[in-house]
Image (cartoon, coloured by chain):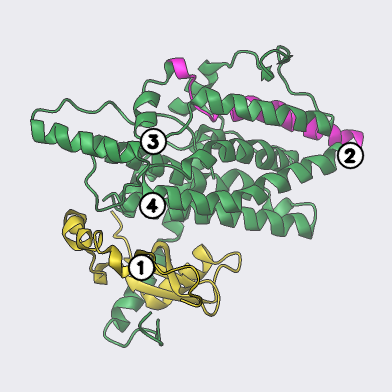
């Protein structure tokens, strides 16, 4: 069986001023080819002005099993949101 | 982009232990809350298998689907039609790539999927086992085959599996041009000479029934639909989608001045639906079993392309190996966010 080329994750900046956003993945022999394949695969309709490719094996991800431990502590800290504070309506510009 | 409801999820396996049952229950609860399942999340093995099967069939359909239309690129009647057809065929290839990527997130390698296709072990939409005999077939495919595919695919944008749903959103955005260029092509023929109108009618005659069959077996014979619906891999049954397709397509045929090749087709005023005559499922089964007009030709073309491209893949890999130690290109020079 033919071996797959390396797997890359593709990130596209849709226009200047916006961040690069993950759009999918592809296989390529090297980084240059990954950029070229990303161009053909993900930007056939002017979807981007810049491409990042990252080897998928280089991405470190959080474990869904740990989601609760990681994200639950933020749930009850509602004082981190502006709506937590009651300010009289007469007071402006706050 | 082309889907066909062939065989999707099987029934969940009986669970031996309580913990497993609880996990399954939590999983179903997430689905019921319309939460998306992502690659690293726990999922039942049957869910994973059903998705791999469906997404792979879908990806193969895109790739094999390039063949009947590619057949006409060199013979397109004008430069405009030619660039449009090339763009459409390129899109189909791109759609295949999105879908293979989505399937890979479930733990199957792309090489394995391609291997299965080339070995004749994988299914793809039977519609591509029909030949494209005239230029009008290119119009009929865009209008009917892509039309049926869109009908199938729009609900898949809300599929419970995140990577599949995201691929489908991208695909659906691109698909609408495919259908419109097909209808526009049919319109040009329908407004043309008597010979052109006859060609358009003849293409409709050949593509109508296979397009209806793209929605898969009728609900009564589709054993897997219930589980797929429960897992929100599918959102509507085969017959519901088929009916929707008939309802929107019949008036489009009337506008073209063409006749849908179904003597029993009638408008049901009470139900506000068109009622189609019975589908010849024996034909569907035969094409599925490999007896369609082009099954062998399609696979042979895929194998030939795969073999002919081998030296390119090997050369690229050798080149990459040689330069592996050298600095790769500046992928993100600004770094950071």
Same subunit: marks 4 and 2: yes
| Segment tinted magenta in the rendering | B193-220
Q: CA distance from mark 3 to mark 1?
A: 41 Å
* Residue A39 spot, x, y in % from top left: 51, 70
Report in which chain the residue with disc 1 lies.
Answer: A
Q: Which residue is mark 3?
A: B232
Of residues A89 and B259, the one nearer the viewer is: A89
> Would you say the residues marked 4 and 3 are in contact, meaning their CB atoms lie under 8 Å apart?
no
Of the residues tagged 3 and 1, which is closer to the observer?
1
Which of pointers 4 and 3 lies earlier in the amino acid sequence?
4
The chain letter under disc 3 is B
Pointer 3 with pointer 1, Cβ within 8 A: no
Please name whichever residue, A3 or B14, is drawn nearer the observer in this view of the structure.
B14
Q: Residue B133 placed where, x, y %?
A: 69, 37
Disc 1 marks which residue? Answer: A85
Q: Colour of chain A?
A: yellow
Q: Residue B163 has which mark? A: 4
Please identify, in this view, whether the residue under mark 4 or under mark 2 is nearer the observer: 4
Q: Chain of mark 4?
A: B
Q: In the shown orientation, is residue B116 left or right of residue B87?
A: left
Q: Colour of chain B?
A: green
Q: Secondary structure at mark 3?
A: loop
């Amino acid at each position: 069986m033919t071996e797959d080329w390396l797997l890359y994750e593709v990130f596209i900046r849709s226009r200047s001023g916006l961040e690069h956003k993950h759009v999918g993945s592809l296989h390529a022999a090297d980084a240059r080819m990954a950029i070229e394949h990303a161009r053909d695969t993900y930007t056939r309709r002017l979807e981007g002005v810049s491409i990042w490719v990252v080897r998928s094996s280089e991405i470190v991800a959080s474990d869904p099993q740990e989601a609760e431990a990681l994200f639950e502590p933020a749930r009850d800290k509602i004082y981190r949101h502006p709506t937590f504070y009651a300010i009289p309506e007469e007071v402006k510009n706050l | 982009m082309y889907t066909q409801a062939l065989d999707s999820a099987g029934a969940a396996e009986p669970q031996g232990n309580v913990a497993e049952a609880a996990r399954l229950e939590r999983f179903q609860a997430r689905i019921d809350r319309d939460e998306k399942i992502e690659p690293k999340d726990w999922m039942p093995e049957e869910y994973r298998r059903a998705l791999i099967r469906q997404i792979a069939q879908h990806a193969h359909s895109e790739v094999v689907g390039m063949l009947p239309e590619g057949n006409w690129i060199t013979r397109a009647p004008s430069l405009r039609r030619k660039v449009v057809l090339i763009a459409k065929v390129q899109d189909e290839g791109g759609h295949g790539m999105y879908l293979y990527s989505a399937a890979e997130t479930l733990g199957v390698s792309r090489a394995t999927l391609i291997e299965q296709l080339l070995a004749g072990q994988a299914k793809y939409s039977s519609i591509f086992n029909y030949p494209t005999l005239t230029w009008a077939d290119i119009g009929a495919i865009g209008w009917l085959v892509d039309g049926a595919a869109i009908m199938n695919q729009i609900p898949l944008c809300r599929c419970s599996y995140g990577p599949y749903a995201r691929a489908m959103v991208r695909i659906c955005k691109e698909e609408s041009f495919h259908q419109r260029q097909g209808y526009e092509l049919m319109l040009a023929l329908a407004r043309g000479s008597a010979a052109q109108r006859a060609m358009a009618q003849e293409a409709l005659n050949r593509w109508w029934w296979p397009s209806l069959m793209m929605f898969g077996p009728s609900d009564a014979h589709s054993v897997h639909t219930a589980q797929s619906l429960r897992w929100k891999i599918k959102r509507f049954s085969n017959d519901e989608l088929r009916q929707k397709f008939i309802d929107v397509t019949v008036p489009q045929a009337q506008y073209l001045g063409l006749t849908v090749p179904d003597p029993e087709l009638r408008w049901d005023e009470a139900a506000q639906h068109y009622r189609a005559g019975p589908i010849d499922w024996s034909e569907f089964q035969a094409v599925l079993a490999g007896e369609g007009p082009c099954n062998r030709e399609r696979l042979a073309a895929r194998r030939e392309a795969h073999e002919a491209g081998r030296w390119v893949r090997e050369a690229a890999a050798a080149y990459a190996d040689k330069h592996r130690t050298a600095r790769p290109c500046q992928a993100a020079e600004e770094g950071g966010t």
